[in-house]
Image (cartoon, helix red, strand yellow):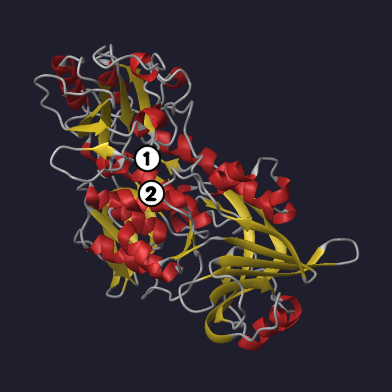
Amino acid sequence: MGDTEVLVVGAGPVGLTAAAELRRRGVECRIVDRLPAPQPYAKAVGIQPRTLEVWDAMGLVREVLDEAVPMRGQLMFVNGEPGPRIDLDLPADVPYRFAALPQDTTERLLTDHLAGYGTTVERGTELLDLEQRDDHVRVSLATPDGPREAAARYVVGCDGAHSRVRRAAGIAFEGDAFPEQYMLGDVEVDWDLPDGYGVRATHLDADGVADDLLVCIPLPGRRRYRMSMLIPPELASAPSGEVAHGLERGHAPELRHIQAVLDRLSPQPTTATALRWSSVFRISHRLADRYREGRLLLAGDAAHIHPPTGAQGMNTGVQDAYNLAWKLALAVRGIAADGLLDSYHAERHAVGEEVVGRTVRHARAGFDADPDDLTTLLLREAQLLVGYRGGPLTPPGGGAGDPGGGHGPLAGDRAPDCGGLERPLTAFPQRLFDLLRSPRHALLLYADAGTPAERLHGTAAAARSAAHGLLDVHVVLAAGADSRPDGLRLPEVRDAAGAFRAAYAPGDGARDGADAGTGAGAAFLIRPDGYLAARLPAGDPGGPAAELRRAFAAPGATGSTA
């Protein structure tokens, strides 16, 4: 049981994502889980479009799409009568749609993906205690071979609502619990409701208060659903006194318990069969007061728990891990700017706070409590509106010069995808996301035939030096440019369909419709987690290098390692 650079505690989707992204960046990493084997449970099943974008960048999305099923919408019924139907329609420029996938399948795919980097989950290994020291964390583990001691430079707690890492760090986890107790069941039914649609059926009492509930989420298979409902009195139990959230020990619901709820609330007469798994669970809402304590960091349920409304929990945790991994990798290498690791809390704690508040509001009052229009609501549920404007890694005003005039994304916004890019040696168009499938920062230099190649080369060289070589550079040639800058020695794509200009509004003459050859352009710096770090005018060749110093220590200097 050797020492390591990073110890990840917990091998659910969040911990597996963190470990895989650390390994993709060459960080030595161990991942441990107290359970001797993965749980074969369809717990968290909703996959948001933004999470699919993350898995695309990680190189995992094909396997997920092969296993998942579409979530096309939700059918609502109140007291047996059809209510509003929600169709989960997103704008055409969003590359992925809503999906459903059992959590055990998600974990299997991520485990296999991690194994491709030579790292396996150390099962039956439980964190007992830890002690922070000046340059490492000393941990005590219970393993199948007995107690062991080990050291890690950092520990990432992805160990759920009852996190031992959080407790050892002394981080408060304030909140409250919902009084209701629920049960889950993974079953098949014989109704003929439309494929791909969830079902939400409620019964309202004489005062209009919901006193019975059935929520069904489609899963891969024929008429297979994960169903949740209020628990019958015979299965109810008193709270344990600890954080009351998630699956609980006790009597598992039987098929007859689920059938009784279907008999009351199903929109069609139906019979449930093939019970794969069932459990009882409670819901709490809590938020860690900080996501970092020295060399200890929290992600996922260890940092935030909330109602499952809108399938936000696992997806928020996966994106915690995705945000953290690139920052932690730079810290381990000693080239992170001072404060880079602190930006993890600054960015993700605000997201967790918003998600907890929104899901609690929706759980108590429904989606009608949200005043936004349906498209905005769906984009938020898809986690496509998460952003970090005004955060510690963004320049004031969204970027020096704001070449888009406010029409394109600003620093801190999710970097949108676009299609129709033509690349030399290919006979097919490419997506922008094809260029960003990398663990490094990316610099996109928008240019035309009149842009001096040496200016582009100088900008790229200065930026690469500032990023310690961890930077991909691509020139995006304007649609109207009939040739490339003379002497260009950088990778290039042509914005043949004008989709990049429409999505990013690079501004200057190019955005205003001036003829090619003016030399107009802009620079877009994109973080490894797919967010815009800066947008800069073309006439500022040192701008990208200056912005990169928010993340990287100056070349030759020792950066933050604590």
Gap between marks 1 and 2, in whole Å? 10 Å
Task: Nearest to the eye among marks 1 and 2: give it.
Answer: 1
| Up/down of 530 relative to 444, above or below | below
**Residue 538 locus on image (x, y percent):** 29, 15
**Residue 554 locus on image (x, y percent):** 22, 22
Circle 2 residue: 53
Relative to 296, is 153 on the left or the right?
left
Contact between labelled residues 2 and 1, with CB atoms less than 8 Å apart: yes
- The amino acid type found where label 2 is placed reads Glu
**Residue 403 locus on image (x, y percent):** 39, 17
Q: In the rendered image, which quarter is residue 548 located in?
A: top left
Count of numbered labels shown in the rendering: 2
Circle 1 residue: 417
Relative to 79, is 557 on the left or the right?
left
**Residue 447 locus on image (x, y percent):** 25, 21
Camera-nearest residue between 408 and 12 = 408
Q: In the rendered image, which quarter is residue 193 located in?
A: bottom right
User: The N terminus is located in which quarter?
Assistant: bottom left
User: The C terminus is located in which quarter?
Assistant: top left
Relative to 180, is 164 on the left or the right?
left
Name the residue rendered at 41%, 25% in the picture: 394
- Mark 1, Cα crowd under 10 Å, few <14 / some 14-19 / many 20+, is some
Name the residue rendered at 23%, 50% in the picture: 24
* Dot 1: element: loop
Relative to 496, is 99 on the left or the right?
right
- The amino acid type found where label 1 is placed reads Asp
| Up/down of 433 relative to 482, above or below | below
Whether residue 260 is visible to the viewer of this picture, yes or no, is yes
